[in-house]
Image (tube, coloured by chain):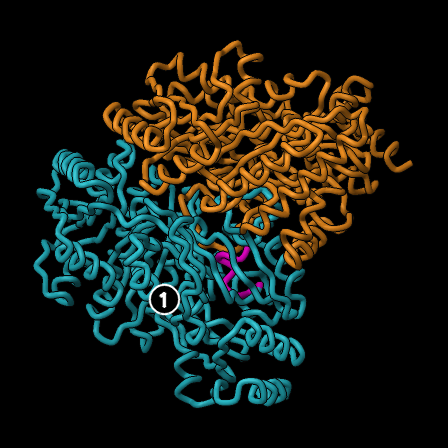
Chain colours: A cyan, B orange
Amino acid sequence: MPVQQALAELRHLLGERLSLSKADLDAHGRSESHFRTTPPDGVVFPETSEEAQDIVRICATHNVPVIGWGAGTSLEGHALAIRGGICVDFSRMNKILEIRSADMDVTVQPGVTREALNEELRATGLFFPVDPGANASIGGMAMTRASGTTAVRYGTMRDNVMGMQVVLADGRLIHTGTRARKSASGYDLTALMVGSEGTLGLTTELTLKLHGIPEAISAGICSFSDMASAVAAVTETIQMGIPMARIEFVCADTARAFNTYAGVSMDPAPHLMVEFHGSPESTAQDAERFAEIVADHDGSPFRWSSREEERRALWAMRHNGYYAILASRKGARALVTDICVPISQLARAVEETQADIAASIIPGPILGHVGDGNFHAILLVDLDQPAELEEAKRLSDRMVERSLALGGTATGEHGVGIGKKPYMAAEHGDAWDVMGSIKQALDPQGIMNPGKVVPGN
Amino acid sequence: MPVQQALAELRHLLGERLSLSKADLDAHGRSESHFRTTPPDGVVFPETSEEAQDIVRICATHNVPVIGWGAGTSLEGHALAIRGGICVDFSRMNKILEIRSADMDVTVQPGVTREALNEELRATGLFFPVDPGANASIGGMAMTRASGTTAVRYGTMRDNVMGMQVVLADGRLIHTGTRARKSASGYDLTALMVGSEGTLGLTTELTLKLHGIPEAISAGICSFSDMASAVAAVTETIQMGIPMARIEFVCADTARAFNTYAGVSMDPAPHLMVEFHGSPESTAQDAERFAEIVADHDGSPFRWSSREEERRALWAMRHNGYYAILASRKGARALVTDICVPISQLARAVEETQADIAASIIPGPILGHVGDGNFHAILLVDLDQPAELEEAKRLSDRMVERSLALGGTATGEHGVGIGKKPYMAAEHGDAWDVMGSIKQALDPQGIMNPGKVVPGN
């Protein structure tokens, strides 16, 4: 068995940092969402880029799959070893290598989590803004092109990764990008790697843009009688040019789930949660202008605060939204949808999705980053009832169909993994084959995270 | 001759829209900078994407090079037919196909120029911000990853192209991207195409992000006793978080060139030209805060205005900087450098470059987009004196070496073309070979703009 030979060589290279324990294999074969557990053949814990190169070379020699692993918070089964192989866990490569305050950038290893990074940055007055909710690893966030609540202001990983070290399928270590703020020097390999989900290589080092911690932050919440009014308020806020740092939507069912999970007492109605970054004057002004828009759309009074503890409580609740919704149906697993449409189509997309879910046999609370036109229905299924997963897939299919018809995408921020792969042909047409050609050129053996993103394979 | 067969088929396809006139061939073989004229074998003027596909298919059949042409304003010889072949001039594909104000985006054909686009957009209250100075075509700007004076605020073409139609080397027409504001759906082919300089395909349609025309704009100018003080003022402005829409630097020699060319009377000293976008209050406040920084660095009083005519005159002068500098030495041609470094290294890079030029036999006025760390020395050479071009190349080599050593890039915004290709191996190492593998995968015959960007070829 080639994998046995690879494991023997990896044992020689890494000693105890190759694990074959059932606990480790299972932990690295599990997904946060509904996919079944598919353990790898071994888990390795490299400590240097050179070790990552050696791991890939050994796997290439024996034609064994290589799958990167960050914090395991992905929702689309990106890191599942669906063809077996070696899981490369980057948790020991979690150093912050260099903070350059004057240039507002930082170089990190892939295993550092966004919370650990921001903790370390605090004293510098800078922060890394991309915030997918989960305490994901920076490497995983880059490889899935993550974004989250702050993308409306600070962009996604696409906009905030300046360069990377990447181990290719043949063991070469390349550097992409530079520390210059812009460059027109050849193909944008950084952008190609961001969102490639480990199918073109493993990242072992990343340089990120940082931003100044705002002098003042105001945040608040309000409810609406219906979803259309909430979405109309969002659209008007964008068109007025009010600079939001976050603008999040939750539906009535999500509000109910928060009440139970977080012990709060929200109206069972659609809500918006909003944050503004700037000076004390500008954030107060932004909050007041937003409050007027909310009032125009018959929303409840916009309650806002610039006090840190209130703000933290608000976003902690929002960040636990997925878990609150999961807990709202005992024993359920989630199929998470992630469509993103042009803002002008958002109200329609949300309304039609809600009508679909209301007519179905399963619950599907909705929440989303509506400033980007991105929202999630968390479809809750009992995996013991096959009809429920079928129903969830049907709802998901219809959402994606709708999104593509409206000029949108199957996945705004979660990535393709195995969950969204069935939609790639419809979304990209011949461009999907072009992705396959690029994969073939850089990984002709097909060992890098096989079965993900590209056709066939 | 394969090219004769291709020309015969193109004649059949396009009739008079294939030109073989010496005037057309020469006009499409000429460069804005120092490269020698290298005319193509024919110039075609497609009117539809389908015609562009047919053109590429004919050239592929006969193994004839295909080179895209926008407005011909490139500075690195990107569109020169250095291996012969067919020049595809997109000037007849210059329509604005759809403006979607609610989504703040627009779909255009590649031949529309940025000035024509902004003229058309004016009534909507939106604008397309990327501004390389020259009235370039949008297709050319995308393919060279152009930026310019406003990148410090609005980003480059990388940040403002949402999607493209691209004709590949085999004639397939693909669509990249969507109209959603973000997506995590597979490899970022839009980013791969932006900056690919026509070596992977021809773009026949582009969807662009638009921005709201600011309610108020203030702009002004000031001088400094030396370049280090000017650069220090820029760095401090960035670190204070004052949101500049433009921050441009010109050296004393450039100021002298402006005096002659534009009939102004600037001090023969380094200057900064700055612009702020926002509300009447915020732009006034920004200008006043900036004025304080300038005073702290012993600059001349910062004279600013929110009057449109003064602002227009200022930027018209700046946009003519290249031509003003060219005119400062009669009969000279330019070798234009374009390094971009981390901000913390900018003062050093500028000072060392100036010292080098001062010790050389040729003049080289400097100007640049210093908010991004990007600046140009316009090296003026008499092409009849071979030693001068040699000297210019030596100076350029040293600038790039310095930039790479400081964490920067060989080209911040002009692109690779043929002028910066000699620096690609040093800048990218093995990553340059990866670019070559991608090229090989998408254009195995090597017909798309051969001799540019990637190794060999």
Which image quarter holds the N terminus of chain B?
A: top right
Q: Is residue A356 magenta?
A: no
Residue bounds of the magenta highlight: A192-200
> Image point 32% across, 57% down: which residue?
A131
Image position, residue A117 (x, y; %): 35, 63
Q: Position of residue A353 (x, y in %)?
A: 30, 51
Name the residue nearer the viewer: B76 or B362: B362
Instruction: Report which quarter residue A97 is drawn in.
Output: bottom left
Furthest-top residue in this view: B263
Quick one: SS at disc 1? Answer: loop
Q: Quadrant of residue B280?
A: top left
Does the image show residue B162?
A: no
* Residue B3 horizontal side relative to residue B35, left or right: right
Q: Is residue A197 in the magenta section?
A: yes
B281 is higher (above) or lower (below) than A415: above
Furthest residue in direction right, as rendered: B1
Q: On screen, B150 above or below B135?
A: below
Q: Residue A24: image x %, image y %? A: 41, 85
- Using the image, name the chain to which the residue with label 1 belongs: A
Q: Nearer the viewer, residue A245 or A97?
A: A97
Residue A76 lies, with reference to residue A103, above or below; the image says below
Q: Position of residue B173 (x, y in %)?
A: 63, 42
In the rendered image, which residue does mark 1 sit on? A113
Residue shown at 38% from the left, 45% from the top? A341
Which residue corresponds to the image point at 28% horizontal and 31% vertical from the top-left?
B289
Type of secondary structure dominating the magenta stretch: loop
> Residue drawn 26% across and 31% down?
A240
Q: Is residue B440 visible?
A: yes
Query: Disc 1 marks which amino acid?
Result: Thr
